[in-house]
Each structure stands twice: as structure tokens, then as C-alpha cells.
Amino acid sequence: MSKYPFLDEKIDELKKSGVYRTLPINYGPIDHTIDLNHKLVINLSSNNYLGLATHERIKHAAVRAIDQYGVGAGSVRTIVGNQDLLEHLEIILANFKHEEAVTCFQSGFTCNLGVIPALTDKDDLIISDELNHASIIDGIRLSKAERMVYRHSDMNHLEELLLQHRSSYKNVFIITDGVFSMDGDIAQLPEIVKLAKKYQALTYVDDAHGSGVLGESGRGTVDHFHLNGEVDFIVGTLSKAIGVVGGYLASKQIVKDWLLHRARPLLFSTALPPSAIASTIEAVKILSESDAYTKRLWDNSFYFKEGLKNLGFDIGHSETPITPVMIGEEAKTMAFSKALLAEGVFVSAIVFPTVPQGKGRLRCMLSASHTKEDLDRALEAFELVGKQMNIIV
């Protein structure tokens, strides 16, 4: 008899609905092609937008840092102090983002978990886009503030909520993703900033999928809309386009001063390792030197999107390299992903609860490291499987 019958039931439910999965094993670096279960396949499932995860300069920076500093930070930064590398990284990131200060966290997820509760209180209100990332949702749940949700990118609904409720709260925070990770569309930041000014609200943007992708040399969604200095709190990640690991908040210095006293991930979890810090510094230097990587990423994205549309696939309303291929039913989405893998193309199926039921999709993630040959082969596989499964004609 099983010790955990409640889990047996849940796993059986996953299997019956066709969404149970066993994670494949990758036997090498994350690049445009990967050795997945000992088979070389085209990788369309990675957030390594610029291909920097395998860049020689960045790898060498990591090795040098290990030689000088060791492999770990040793403790929480508020106990053992900051290594000079981390101080240097936060200055470099602040300059890159054209913001006053940056506070680094262990990940983008822990950044939202730490920052949102630290900034908000019981007399405050958070108004959140309905399609915001899970880390934002969890950060809001941990806060003492009241919370409301506005329909996705619906500025009329957002203003209705502000008009009705602004006067009842001390501070109001409008929180949105910069780029929405499942559909690839961009937040209407200019309109959000206007409403925030009109109703004396604060703006908070999680730019995980905009960092390294939008704006000058990948400075992000805020820079893309020329709103530098007009968004109060900007979250970025170091694990996607930057190619390493970690997250950060760009803000005013006084915000950083407060977070170093109250953001729980900073107070109770060991800081980033030296190798990750040094790698990130080198990655930001590379972005500052040239926009070649972001240009190549966008060229690949336009090429692949056009190919999918010409084949007849529904790719939603993406405005970024995130390219969903809408399938719908969960089991069919999983079957599509499995059939593509058999053809040498790895694209993870995205199903409930990551997206609403009936909205399953294959989320294709383009990279600057993909070659046109990679993309042509992937399109051929999509055409073959799409016709076999009667998704296209």
C-alpha cells in the first residue's frame, strides 16, 4: 500500500488527462542545439535569448572569479557583507539601466517574493494585470496589502479601479509584466505611467522577458518606451538574456536602503556565487559594446514567425521573440510536443495550470544563436506534425 495515496490519486489524474510528463535529460550546454536524452535536437525551449550562456568571454570570467573568490558567497550578504564583485555588478547594472540603484537577488522569482511584501503594507492597494507571472502573484499573496486584478492590458478597466478605489488607500501599486511570458505581448507602459501620474500611484514592472531583448542594447521595456526614470520599480532577471542566474530591482537608492533591511530573501538566503556575478558583469559589458546580439535575435524571430504564419499556424499576438503556437486541448498539446521531439525539435508544451484550460500552446523561444538552417529544419518539422495532427492543412 502506498504511503501517499493522495499523491497517487493526483498523479493518476495527470496521466488520465494526458499531461503527465517525465523531464528529459540534457547532456551538455544549453545552446541552439542540445543533446537531449542522447539525441541532438534543435532547442526552442530555452530563455537563452542572446546565446550568452555559452559565450567564451563569459565562461572565462566565471573561471577567473572561482580562482579568486571560490565557489560560494559564504553567507547572507547582510551578515558577511558584500563581496566587491557584487558591489561592482550593482553599479554596472544601475548604469546600464539608467537608474539610480540596483539591488541583486538570487533569482527574479525571489526578487518579486522579497520586494513586493517589503514595499507594501496593510493600508496599501496592489492592482495587478491578470496575466502577470506566478512570482508576482506569489509576492502579492505574501504582502499585507489589499489586491485587485485588472483585465489583461485593459487600460479602461485599470482606470475604473483607480477611480473607484485610489482615495481609500495610502499607496497604490500598479504591477505588470513588461513582456508577458506566455503570449509574448508587451505591456502598455506609456498608458500605465500616465494613469499612475493622474492618480498618484506607483508603477512596478517585472521586465524578465524584456531585459536583453527590448530597448537600446537590450535595456528593457522601460527603455523601449523611453520611460527611463518614470517607472518606480523595475525587476530584471540575469538568467534569461544575460545567460547566468539571479534577479535584480532597479530603483531609487532609498528603496535599496530599505530592501537591505526588510527584503526577506536578502536577509535569510545566501547571496549569488562569485562565478555568477562575474559572468553577469561580462555579459552586461558585451551588451554595452554592441547591439549585434539583439539584432540577430530579432532577425531570427521575424523569420520564424513569418514561416509559422505562412504554414497556417495560430501564433497569437506576440510582439517579441516569445512565439506561442496555439493548440488548445491539453493532451493534444502534449502529443504535438512529443511528435516534434521525434522529428528532432524540442519545444515544451505549456498547459494548465501555467495557462488557462483549453489554451495549451507550444511556446517557441528564439535565440540569437539559432542559424537559419536550424529554423528551416524546425519549420519543416512543424509542417509535418501539424498536418499529421490536422492542425494545419
Image (cartoon, rainbow, N blue to C red):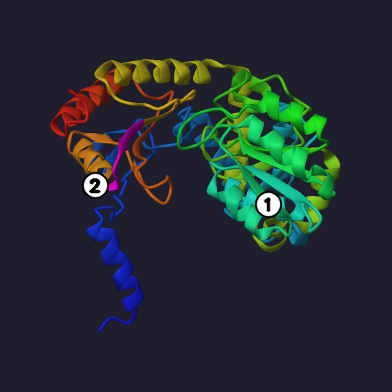
Residue 28 located left or right of residue 379? right
x, y percentage for residue 241? 52, 32
Query: Which mark, residue 37?
Result: 2
User: Magenta residues?
Assistant: 325-331
Considering depth in this image, is 357 or 304 the residue closer to the camera?
Answer: 357
Residue 236 located left or right of residue 162? left
- As for residue 327 lying within the magenta part, the answer is yes
> What amino acid type should be assigned to the residue bearing mark 1?
Arg
Quarter-of-image position of residue 315: top left
x, y percentage for residue 263? 73, 56
Residue 243 located left or right of residue 78? left
Callout 2 touching callout 1 (CB < 8 Å): no
Q: Earlier in the sequence, mark 2 or mark 1?
A: 2
Please tell me how crowded label 1 is: few (under 14), some (14-19), or many (20+) other residues with Cα within 10 Å.
some
Tell me which residue sits at (76%, 42%) in the image.
Answer: 164
Residue 92 located left or right of residue 291? right
Query: Which mark, residue 183?
Result: none
Furthest residue toward bottom: 1
Q: Is residue 262 above or below residue 341?
A: below
Which quarter of the figure is the C terminus placed in? top left
Q: Is residue 108 above or below residue 20?
A: above
x, y percentage for residue 182? 45, 37
Which residue bears the numbered disc 1? 147
Considering depth in this image, is 280 or 238 the residue closer to the camera?
Answer: 238
Which quarter of the figure is the N terminus placed in? bottom left
Please tell me how crowded label 2 is: few (under 14), some (14-19), or many (20+) other residues with Cα within 10 Å.
few
Q: Is residue 55 above or below residue 290?
A: below
Tell me which residue sits at (74%, 39%) in the image.
Answer: 162
- As for residue 137 lying within the magenta part, the answer is no
Secondary structure of the residue carrying numbered label 2: loop
